[in-house]
Image (spheres, coloured by chain):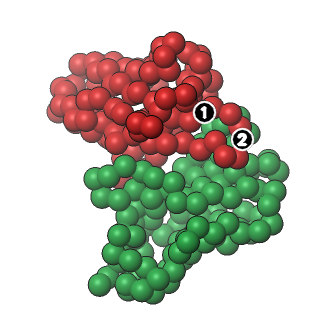
Chain colours: A red, B green
């Protein structure tokens, strides 16, 4: 099976712009979660989509939004970029159940730099 | 909200030696799952080992094992016979029954040849 893919891998934007990141989960996975990773902060949960619905949401401002399509692919959008949004954005997919064996598989991430 | 704490930002170990990475968590739930993930430099995060909270027996995966102390809310990772390829950032994670994951801030492990 192909793994989780994220595009683009690297992105440079300027303050005030908006950006859209894409994530394609493992085939058969219905849950996609997004995380922001910065040095010293670890992984901070942004939101989870399951079957095209946002099921869980972290504590991020409304500038961060996402959506999921019927094929489970997900996009994350950040509007009005700030310097502090520079980070590695990770996407993780899973079956989406609460079963023990259902764990998250991560993509390689998108490195966003805001200038 | 659940919190996961990794109190060791950096650790180092001699090749072939054993190292233990610490993780504590805070929860009021009785049913949950715990994980250790490894993120090598510039590479993808991968699952190392996982543990069900209602299982007393500690999980083991080859050279990786955990010491799960439910009452103390502690979940440490032991790496035996450390290899150069074990050098990575290690993240402890907690998964609740709503399928939400909570991650610690990570421990950077250096393996000294």
Vertical position of residue B15 compared to residue B74: above or below: below
Judge left or right: residue B36 versus residue A90: right
As displayed, is residue A59 above or below residue B111? above
> What is the quadrant of residue B69 in the picture?
bottom right
* Residue sitting at x 63%, y 69%: B60
Pointer 1 residue = A95
For mark 1, name the chain: A
Q: How many marks?
A: 2
Residue at x 18%, y 26% (from the top left corner): A14
Residue B111 at x, y = what percent? 35, 77
Q: Is residue A100 visible?
A: yes
Nearest to the observer: residue B31 or residue B26:
B31
Please state the horizontal and vertical placement of residue B73, each as a whole percent of the image. 72, 63
Mark 1–mark 2 Cα distance, whole angstroms, equals 9 Å
Give the residue at x 42% y 75%: B11
Who is closer to the viewer here, A95 or A66? A95
Q: In what element is the residue under mark 1? A: loop
Question: Disc 2 is attached to a residue of which chain?
Answer: A
Residue occupying the far front of the picture = A1
Question: What residue sits 58% from the left and 60% below the top?
Answer: B49
In the rendered structure, are the residues bearing label 1 and label 2 in contact, judged by CB atoms less than 8 Å apart?
yes
Q: Which quarter shows the C terminus of chain A?
A: top left
Query: What SS does tag 2 mark?
Result: loop
Q: Which mark is residue A99?
A: 2
Task: Give the numbered dot on residue A87.
Answer: none
Quadrant where the N terminus of chain A is found in the figure: top left
Front residue (pair B24, A7): A7
């Amino acid at each position: 099976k192909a793994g989780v893919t994220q595009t683009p891998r690297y992105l440079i934007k300027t303050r005030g712009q908006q950006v859209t990141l894409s994530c394609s989960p493992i085939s058969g996975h219905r849950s996609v979660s997004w995380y922001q990773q910065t040095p010293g902060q670890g992984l901070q949960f942004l939101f989870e989509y399951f079957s095209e619905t946002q099921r869980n949401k972290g504590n991020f401002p409304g500038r961060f939004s996402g959506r999921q399509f019927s094929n489970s692919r997900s996009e994350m959008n950040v509007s009005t970029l700030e310097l502090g949004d520079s980070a590695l954005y990770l996407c993780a997919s899973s079956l989406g159940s609460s079963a023990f064996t259902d764990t998250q598989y991560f993509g390689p991430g998108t490195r966003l730099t805001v200038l | 909200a659940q919190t996961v704490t990794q109190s060791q930002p950096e650790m180092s170990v001699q090749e072939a030696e054993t190292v233990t990475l610490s993780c504590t968590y805070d929860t009021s739930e009785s049913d949950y799952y715990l994980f250790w993930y490894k993120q090598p430099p510039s590479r993808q995060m991968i699952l190392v080992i996982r543990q069900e909270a209602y299982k007393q027996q500690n999980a083991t995966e080859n050279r990786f094992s955990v010491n799960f102390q439910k009452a103390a809310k502690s979940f440490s990772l032991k790496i035996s016979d450390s290899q150069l390829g074990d050098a990575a950032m290690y993240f402890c994670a907690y998964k609740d029954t709503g399928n939400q994951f909570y991650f610690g801030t990570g421990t950077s492990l250096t393996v000294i040849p």
